[in-house]
Amino acid sequence: MNASVSLISVPDGRVLIPADEVTGLLRHLAGEWLSVVYHGEVPLDPKTTLGLACVLMAFADRIDAECIAYLPGPEEDPGH
């Protein structure tokens, strides 16, 4: 899997990755697992792989939901 991510350096020396890129990578990985199992490219147990893929997609959904909840609502927008 070839993927690139945007890295954001912060003053304390840590490096951050935008949440939408993290969730995109998680969903892409889950899709790749399902694809290789479906096409018989690797000998993975389909039921286990589906379970793991579902966990990754649910985690991505949770990150998205938490990010959406973090955003200010229209009534909180300081620009208006």
Image (cartoon, helix red, strand yellow):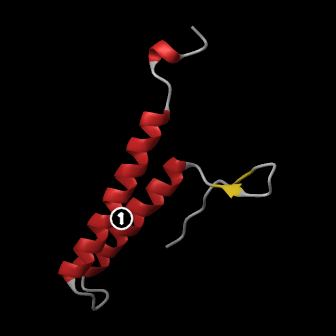
> For this rendering, which residue is in front, 3 or 45?
45
Identify the image quadrant of residue 38.
Answer: bottom left
> For this rendering, which residue is in front, 3 or 68?
68
Residue depicted at 43% across the width and 50% down the height: 63
Residue depicted at 30% across the width and 69% down the height: 53
Quarter of the image that includes the C terminus? top right
Identify the image quadrant of residue 16.
Answer: bottom right
Q: Residue 61, percent across and down?
A: 35, 50
Q: Say few, some or many: other residues with alpha carbon within 10 Å of mark 1 (under 14 / 14 to 19 / 20 or more).
A: many
Residue depicted at 61% across the width and 54% down the height: 17
Relative side of 9 to 57, left or right: right
Task: Please name the residue that numbered disc 1 is placed on.
Answer: 56
Relative side of 15 to 38, left or right: right
Q: Residue 70, percent across and down?
A: 48, 35
Residue depicted at 54% across the width and 70% down the height: 2
The residue positioned farthest toward the left in the image shown: 47
Q: Residue 69, percent across and down?
A: 42, 35
Q: Amino acid at mark 1?
A: Leu
Q: Is residue 65 above or below residue 30?
A: above
